[in-house]
Image (spheres, rainbow, N blue to C red):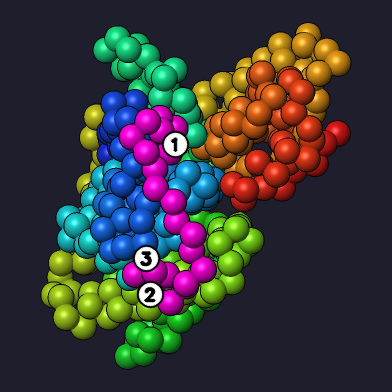
């Protein structure tokens, strides 16, 4: 328990700042910017996909419907793949959190590695996957890549700030808060239960330790921020910084959900090239860290965190940890319960008309998933209103659209759907 509290105290000021920046980016950067330049089967679209993905604060599951929406709106397979790789591996919030626990070199190298990984993945798709009927996105297209309607965004500065705070400290925390807590608990369990010399078994065999990390990281769901305390705990148990970087790259970018969706929507060849690029680049950058760059660069942050553990914690960090805990409680319990109750009381019950239909949507894990599903349904001709509840996985749709059209729109962005 003491180890978990220490990690929270180290990360909390940076996490609060990261969530704030995530909200500001979401509100003040128009969504149309993210998809207008991604059409065309060329390296430029791949470059834009990587550049847009690196700072974008989307979790590992939220990036899936967002990327599938980009694909549907005209993004090439290469650009979509670059976006799929770069976005979950980093993000402005996780970069700041990486600096808090792993130090500046890790915080700089992590987005660089993700960017290079995205470029390689996108290039491989464009080069070897010829089955890509890319379309261009016109200037008149105003769909938002994050799943929201840009026309509905607030216009005044203070309304934008309020929405930015809500997105960062409520929606984002709902999306990754659970996984952050799980990551901290796993880190604490590793610190307590794993022997200090466990990874001494792999000393002198960096390749074997990297393969072990890959076998664990690829199928497991873990977000970019939640992977940081796990990496710290493993380094403290003897894992090399390079192998830890493999975890930070492969863990967020790969999980069974993304593997299944990419295979279904973009094809098996795309999936194979996607996994190949992630594995190859993770191992490459792991070797760069362990064999080329000075080892002291990547041990300073962890050693500093360990020393601070014995020196005590400042009141500022304690206050930040309390604020973070209260925000997590609000996001994960109070706000989510209120939103769930509001959905059933005001949408499915009181609007129970002949044209109101209910659908079960499987595969949603965060608010980005929910918003993308709502956007897809509202884009179906004949739909007059639609609301999606994340907890019950239920959509309430009003209009004359057929269930077949509704389910087709949902399945095009990677979810499964059936009418009730």
- Quarter of the rendering containing residue 353: top right
Identify the residue shown where x is 35% and y is 50%. 38
Question: How many residues crowd around disc 3 within 10 Å: few (fewer than 14), some, or many (20 or more)?
Answer: many
Residue with the mark numbered 3: 122
Query: Does residue 143 belong to the magenta stretch?
Result: yes
User: Which numbered marker is on residue 127?
Assistant: 2
Query: Which tag is nearer the camera, tag 2 or tag 3?
Result: 2
Identify the residue shown where x is 32% and y is 90%. 204
As measured in the structure, the alpha-carbon distance from the residue carrying label 2 to the one carrying label 3 is: 9 Å
Residue with the mark numbered 1: 146
Height in image: 119 above or below 3? below
- Quarter of the rendering containing residue 348: top right
The residue closer to the viewer here, 318 or 285, is 285
Identify the residue shown where x is 31% and y is 63%. 42
Q: Magenta region: which residues?
A: 121-146
Left/right of residue 384 with respect to residue 128 in the rendered view? right
Q: Earlier in the sequence, mark 2 or mark 3?
A: 3
């Amino acid at each position: 328990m003491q180890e978990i509290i220490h990690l929270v105290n180290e990360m909390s000021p940076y996490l609060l700042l990261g969530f704030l920046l995530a909200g500001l980016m979401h509100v003040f950067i128009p969504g149309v910017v993210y998809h207008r330049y991604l059409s065309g089967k060329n390296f430029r679209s791949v470059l834009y996909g990587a550049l847009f993905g690196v700072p974008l604060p989307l979790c590992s599951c939220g990036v899936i419907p967002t990327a599938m929406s980009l694909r549907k709106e005209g993004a090439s397979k290469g650009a979509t793949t670059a976006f799929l790789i770069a976005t979950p591996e980093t993000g402005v919030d996780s970069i700041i959190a990486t600096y808090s626990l792993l130090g500046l070199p890790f915080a700089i190298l992590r987005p660089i590695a993700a960017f290079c990984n995205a470029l390689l993945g996108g290039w491989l798709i464009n080069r070897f996957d010829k089955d890509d009927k890319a379309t261009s996105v016109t200037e008149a297209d105003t769909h938002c890549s994050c799943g929201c309607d840009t026309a509905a965004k607030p216009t005044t500065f203070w309304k934008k700030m309020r929405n930015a705070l809500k997105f960062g400290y409520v929606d984002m925390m709902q999306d990754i808060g659970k996984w952050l807590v799980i990551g901290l608990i796993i880190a604490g369990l590793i610190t307590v239960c794993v022997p200090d010399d466990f990874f001494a078994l792999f000393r002198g065999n960096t390749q074997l330790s990297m393969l072990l990390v890959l076998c664990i990281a690829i199928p497991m769901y873990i977000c970019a921020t939640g992977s940081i305390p796990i990496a710290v705990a493993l380094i403290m148990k003897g894992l090399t910084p390079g192998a830890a970087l493999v975890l930070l790259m492969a863990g967020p970018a790969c999980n069974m959900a993304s593997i299944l969706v990419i295979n279904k929507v973009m094809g098996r060849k795309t999936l194979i090239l996607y996994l190949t690029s992630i594995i190859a680049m993770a191992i490459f950058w792991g070797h760069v860290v362990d064999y080329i760059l000075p080892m002291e660069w990547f041990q300073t942050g962890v050693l500093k965190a360990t020393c601070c553990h014995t020196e005590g914690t400042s009141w500022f960090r304690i206050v930040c940890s309390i604020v973070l805990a209260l925000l997590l409680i609000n996001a994960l319990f109070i706000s989510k319960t209120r939103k769930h109750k509001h959905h059933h009381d005001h949408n499915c019950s009181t609007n129970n008309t002949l044209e109101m239909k209910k659908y079960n949507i499987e595969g949603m894990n965060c608010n980005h998933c929910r918003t993308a599903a709502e956007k897809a349904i509202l884009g179906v001709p004949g739909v007059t209103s639609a609301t999606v509840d994340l907890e019950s996985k239920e959509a309430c749709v009003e209009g004359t659209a057929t269930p077949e059209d509704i389910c087709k729109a949902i399945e095009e962005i990677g979810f499964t759907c059936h009418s009730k």
